[in-house]
Image (cartoon, grey):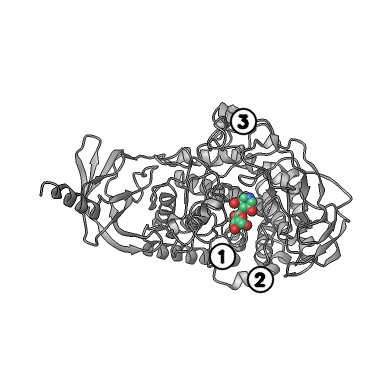
């Protein structure tokens, strides 16, 4: 008998472990929603209490049962402690479990927004990264690719297509590295840059001297300074006038060599400048010895350039009219080149860099025409955008690098001086989409505005892009529910998820530590730094188990658990400019929503 009692006790304990409490590791705004999600074994409501630093109960209640949630594999209870509004440090106690201490405090999002923006400085190619701007010696590094004068890929790609190269080289020094690799891609560079520029247009949250940047103090808002670093690079990627070169026209399926057609490619944009072969990890950018090549122009890259250059022309119009004029000229030329060559899809058979291949460019046309119309008011662009299928469709998805129509919609809804007939139409589409995201939030177990069980590569970017759409809806309507939805998106990324992961370095008790990055790779070389505060991981992904770490879990993880904070997990734990950009947007907006 004596032997049996402890075994029986253990068995009972194993059946009912204390519930796991999941909440944002950043903390909570005094006037914001406050939710925790608790994973339990049962469906009966549980008593909860919020304790202050002295152990005094300041709020209590009963959980709302959430049932079984397929996205996490958890049976859930929801705690709403929004009644706690006094600043302070608290813990949540529930059925024998206690959360870590968390703060209720104004201003929580300011350091997050600043860190998330600083990520872009640290991803700069072509200049040394200085300790005084990067947050300390450990992140300082010599310039990577300081003089990047590149020639075009020449010879046979792995598919057998024979590329002739080009008669010119271009100085494409500068811009941001895309991610953990050293590629600079016009397609993904476009949405990342647009997001920062749109944040400036909507909320202007970073005046001069508000960020740590070499340009701080130059009289220009710091967000525009960081954005310009990338925009100048994108402008350089434009193909010289009069260039005739053979390119693939239309969809060319099958594995063999593509047919190339001689085209006037002047004004198009090269798809990317990148390494000829994948480089090993770890690696400081300055140690990259691979050949750097320009890859063939694509219609999608050309329209990315047209869109962001048109957006830039609008935003620098008063600050730097000469630069604005240069942007507008490049944008118009790019748009004309895309109309001339409307179906040159990116060739993706090359090794050494990501593909960003996009076989559908109707959304890019809509986006670029929208930006050009917003900047110029020219009826020719208006005709293109209102004739597009993307104008008539219901907007159904958050923006992504391959689906950029909503970027045009947001600009038409938020830029100044847009014809009310256009702006009203686009505002209604955004609000309807935001309502749809809120409805998904209400059904999602962890109450994030992302339903279903399919988590794509870079799901945190998708979730935060939904946060941005909710923020635009908040800007347009002033309705608090949209801001709450944004906070739900942020809370998930900051730890309210089944694996208690703060996907952001430097924030929370379990922050991102080992991203797939060539320089921030301390697990491969202890002399290298970890990710700087504000760096976001791509996050859970159950749609492409593309790396060796992910492969081990294929078929075995619930969507939100398909993740590891491991440098080798490039499909789960890379960082990227298009994912960090909506983190800047959401954090900066939550820190200081613009006056209505
Ligand atoms: O974000 C991209 C994702 O949508 C794609 O499914 C994936 C595979 O093609 O590539 C991702 O982008 C990567 C790019 O190709 C190269 N730099 C790192 C990017 C993030 O992983």
Using a 10 Å C-alpha cutoff, classify the residue at mark 1 as few (fewer than 14 neighbours), some (14 to 19) or many (20 or more). many
Examine the rendered structure and indicate whether residue 510 appears above or below residue 13. Answer: above
Q: Is mark 1 within 8 Å of ligand 1?
A: no
Examine the rendered structure and indicate whether residue 219 appears above or below residue 169. Answer: above
- Quadrant where ligand 1 appears: bottom right
Q: Nearer the viewer, residue 501 or 480?
A: 501
**Residue extending furthest left?**
1
Secondary element at tag 3? loop
| 261 left or right of 408 in image | right
Rendered image: mark on residue 388: 2
Alpha carbons under labels 2 and 1: distance apart: 13 Å
Residue 318 visible to an observer of this rendering: no
Using a 10 Å C-alpha cutoff, classify the residue at mark 3 as few (fewer than 14 neighbours), some (14 to 19) or many (20 or more). some
Counting residues from the N terminus, which is met first, the one under dot 3 or under dot 2? 3
Q: Nearer the viewer, mark 2 or mark 1?
A: 2
The residue under label 3 is 217
User: Would you identify the image quadrant in which residue 290 lies?
Assistant: top right
Alpha carbons under labels 3 and 1: distance apart: 37 Å
The residue under label 1 is 426
Residue at 59% x, 48% y: name it.
576
- Could you say where residue 268 lies in the image, as x and y percent from the top left? 78, 57
Secondary element at tag 2? loop
- Could you say where residue 260 lies in the image, as x and y percent from the top left? 83, 65
């Amino acid at each position: 008998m004596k032997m049996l009692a402890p075994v029986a006790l253990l068995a009972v304990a194993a059946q009912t472990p204390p519930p796991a409490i999941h909440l944002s590791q950043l903390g909570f705004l005094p006037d914001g929603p406050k939710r925790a999600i608790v994973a339990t074994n049962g469906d009966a409501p549980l008593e909860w209490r919020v304790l202050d630093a002295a152990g005094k109960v300041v709020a209590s209640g009963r959980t709302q049962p959430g049932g079984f949630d397929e996205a996490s594999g958890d049976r859930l209870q929801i705690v709403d402690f929004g009644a706690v509004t006094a600043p302070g440090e608290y813990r949540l106690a529930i059925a024998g479990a206690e959360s870590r201490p968390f703060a209720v405090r104004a201003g929580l999002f300011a350091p997050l927004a600043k860190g998330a923006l600083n990520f872009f400085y640290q991803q700069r190619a072509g200049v040394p990264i200085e300790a005084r701007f990067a947050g300390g010696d450990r992140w300082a590094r010599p310039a990577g690719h300081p003089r990047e004068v590149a020639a075009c890929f020449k010879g046979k790609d792995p598919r057998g297509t024979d590329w002739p190269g080009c008669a010119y080289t271009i100085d494409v020094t500068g811009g941001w590295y895309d991610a953990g690799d050293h590629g600079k891609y016009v397609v993904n560079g476009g949405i990342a840059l647009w997001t920062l520029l749109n944040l400036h247009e909507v909320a202007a949250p970073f005046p001069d001297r508000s960020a740590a940047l070499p340009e701080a103090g130059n009289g220009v808002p710091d967000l525009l300074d960081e954005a310009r670093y990338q925009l100048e690079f994108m402008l350089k990627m434009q193909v010289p006038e009069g260039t005739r070169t053979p390119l693939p026209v239309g969809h060319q399926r099958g594995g063999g060599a593509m047919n190339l057609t001689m085209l006037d490619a002047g004004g198009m944009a090269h798809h990317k400048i990148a390494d000829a072969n994948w480089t090993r990890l770890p690696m400081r950018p300055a140690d990259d010895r691979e050949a750097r090549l320009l890859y063939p122009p694509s219609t999608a890259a050309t329209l990315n350039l047209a869109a962001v250059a048109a957006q830039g022309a609008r935003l620098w119009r008063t600050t730097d009219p000469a630069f604005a004029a240069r942007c507008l000229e490049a944008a118009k030329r790019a748009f004309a080149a895309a109309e001339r060559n409307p179906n040159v899809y990116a060739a993706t058979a090359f090794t050494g860099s990501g593909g960003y291949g996009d076989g559908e460019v109707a959304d890019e046309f809509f986006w670029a025409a929208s930006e050009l119309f917003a900047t110029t008011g020219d009826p020719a662009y208006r005709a293109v955008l209102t004739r597009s299928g993307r104008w008539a469709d219901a907007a159904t998805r958050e923006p992504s690098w391959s689906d950029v129509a909503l970027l045009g919609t947001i600009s038409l809804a938020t830029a100044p001086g847009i014809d009310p007939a256009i702006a009203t139409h686009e505002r209604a589409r955004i609000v309807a989409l935001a309502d749809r995201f809120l409805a998904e939030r209400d059904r999602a177990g962890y109450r994030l505005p992302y339903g279903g069980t399919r988590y794509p590569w870079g799901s945190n970017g998708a979730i935060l892009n939904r946060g941005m759409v909710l923020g635009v809806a908040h800007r347009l309507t002033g309705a608090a529910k949209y801001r709450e939805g944004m906070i739900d998106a942020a809370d998930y990324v900051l730890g309210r998820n089944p694996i208690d992961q703060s996907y952001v370095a430097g924030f929370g008790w379990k922050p991102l530590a080992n991203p797939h990055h060539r320089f921030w790779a301390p697990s491969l070389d202890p002399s290298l730094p970890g990710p700087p505060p504000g760096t976001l991981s791509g996050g859970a992904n159950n749609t492409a188990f593309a790396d060796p770490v992910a492969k081990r879990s294929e078929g075995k993880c619930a969507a939100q658990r398909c993740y590891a904070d491991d440098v080798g997990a490039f499909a789960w734990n890379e960082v990227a400019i298009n994912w960090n950009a909506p983190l800047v947007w959401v954090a900066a907006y939550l820190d200081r929503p613009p006056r209505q």
